[in-house]
Image (cartoon, rainbow, N blue to C red):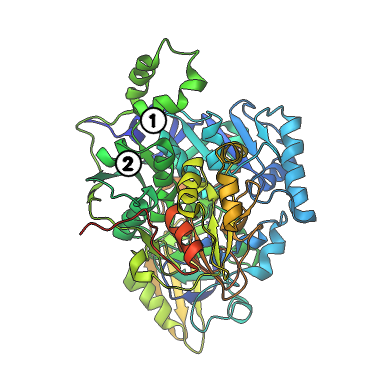
Amino acid sequence: MTTFSGTALCLDRADINTDEIIPARYLTEIDKNVLGPHLMEDLDLAGFDPQKDLAGINVLVTRENFGCGSSREHAPWALEANGIRVVIAESFARIFYQNMFNCGMLAITLDTKQIDRLCDAAGPSPVHISVDVDAGEITATAGPDTWTIPFTLSGFEKALVKAGGWVEYADQNY
Amino acid sequence: MGKTIAEKIFDDHRVDQPFDGVTVLRLDRVFCHEITTPTAIQDLVARGKDRVFDPDKIKAVIDHVTPAKDAKTALQGKVLRDWARRHKITDFFDIGRNGVCHALFPEKGFVRPGFVIIMGDSHTCTHGAFGAFAAGVGTTDLEVGILKGVCAFKKPDTLKIEIFGHLQPGVFAKDVILEVIRRITVNGATNQVIEFCGPVVDAMSMESRMTLSNMAVEAGATSGICRPDAVTVEYLWPFIKDEYPDRDAVLADFSRYLPDDDAVYAGQETIDVTDLVPLTTFGYKPDQVKPVSDMAGTRVDQVYIGSCTNGRIEDLRVAAQVVKGKKIAETIRAIVSPATADVFSKAMDEGLIKIFMDAGFCVTNPTCGACLGMSNGVLASGEVAAATTNRNFNGRMGKGGMVHLMSPATAAATALAGIIANSPLFAQPA
């Protein structure tokens, strides 16, 4: 059983681009872990403080077209360096979406109502999310409330998550 | 049932279909630059798989930061350079011979209709101008491409964008693609291939078609494909003349990659450009587009003419036509970066460099530099740029900076005026 779990943060804005996830000035870094402290330092979102708000976060919940822009895999790497291995959004840009699974990470698409509920639930206590890839089910907990949300991954996406990424998968198969 | 261009290319290149809707394609080209490839190389070395599937199909360039600006960028260049030597990748373009990847590789004749091309750079879609399926990918896809010569893609649903009418003088391919993105929005073509067609595209030069295809990704598209035709043949002829008896034979061969009359499209957009005016962006998204006249008078600190969108000789010719014999505003810094060494050389021969320098422009060596805020023209916080580049994301050319995207003609006119301004090449019809 492949599971991912942790504390979620809602980034309530559409079209968050790769320059905002990790600015190009850090693309001279060859070591992925060096990207960590710079995650989302240019993000244009009212009241957002990356140093404070991203601490202890494992899951991002966000809106349409997350990860648009550059092909830079530095975007998933910067997430991973911060312990974030799951992004849940209304929709994703293609290259970012593929990069997540290529890295053995998880990008999940949910409808607006489900995203609304996850974003609205964050109050005094944060939303905790647990993802069961095999069951195709997210369990969300906010204070006393717990609810489950079904999601769909393609066979290919599941295989990449299981294999730990595309290099491993391709090496076994081609 | 008829097929689109992308469907025909997929049929030709299918290696495997491991899952429903996923096709593993054989690659004709893997393009590399020094920002995203060194990490792939290092990972392959760490895995004990320091191999390349075919050194002749891999082409590499140092273009984002060149000359190196510090120890880190020097190391990125060195990793790529050493790797190219180790694997006998002979088409490796280092300083003095280099240029912005998506301008350089077509110029060297590396692209053909029907090719499947990947690169660790989102604007790889530019090469779709030649009727190729060309897509930007991340480092892991690049790594597998280098090692195995394959890449996985989902089913290529195609959005047909038909452009008809007549472009007014002073209105260019850049204005057309800004209009397309304005209409379909920044995720209007996500997971789709755009097929650009219609009489306006047919009449465009290869360079203008590259400008269209270059920005397909700004609407989310995987690739932006133009139909191969006599213009494509003429551009590629010097590179293929030994392989065919004549141009007609090339055209006949390339026509394999034309869409069928009964091809099925996922969507269609028809745009009449007869009334199109010069456009510019106003926000942090490429679909936030307005007529230049609506933005006229906006303060600008720096004008940048260059990049894989609009740094080709055609672009420099138009910009030089606007600035010839004039001076840029005292309040403006104006930079022109010819996209490749060949563009630079031609611009010298044609006297364009002198025109720019006499007008007060700084002329840099070919590089991606300022476009993504890496080198050669980064903005300070609060500064505003008018640029012929493809992205206006928040902080794109430097933290806290604002970028307005526009054509080379508009950028040149803006450099003269010191504020956003329409070029004199544009005379709005009465």
* Element type where label 2 sits in the image: strand
Estimate the x, y position of residue A95 in percent, counting from the top left. Answer: 48, 51
Q: Quadrant of the C terminus of chain B?
A: bottom left
Q: Is residue A21 left or right of residue B19?
A: right
Q: Residue B245 or B355: which is nearer the viewer? A: B355
| Residue in view at x 61 percent, y 37 percent | B345
Q: Quadrant of the N terminus of chain B?
A: top left
Looking at the rendered structure, the number of numbered marks drawn on it comes to 2
Height in image: B29 above or below B320?
above
Cα distance, mark 2 to mark 1? 13 Å
Q: Is residue A53 left or right of residue A33?
A: left
Q: Which residue is mark 1?
A: B9
* Element type where label 1 sits in the image: helix
Query: Is residue B46 visible to us here?
Result: no
Q: Residue B175 or A141: which is nearer the viewer? A: B175
| Residue in view at x 72 percent, y 63 percent | A34
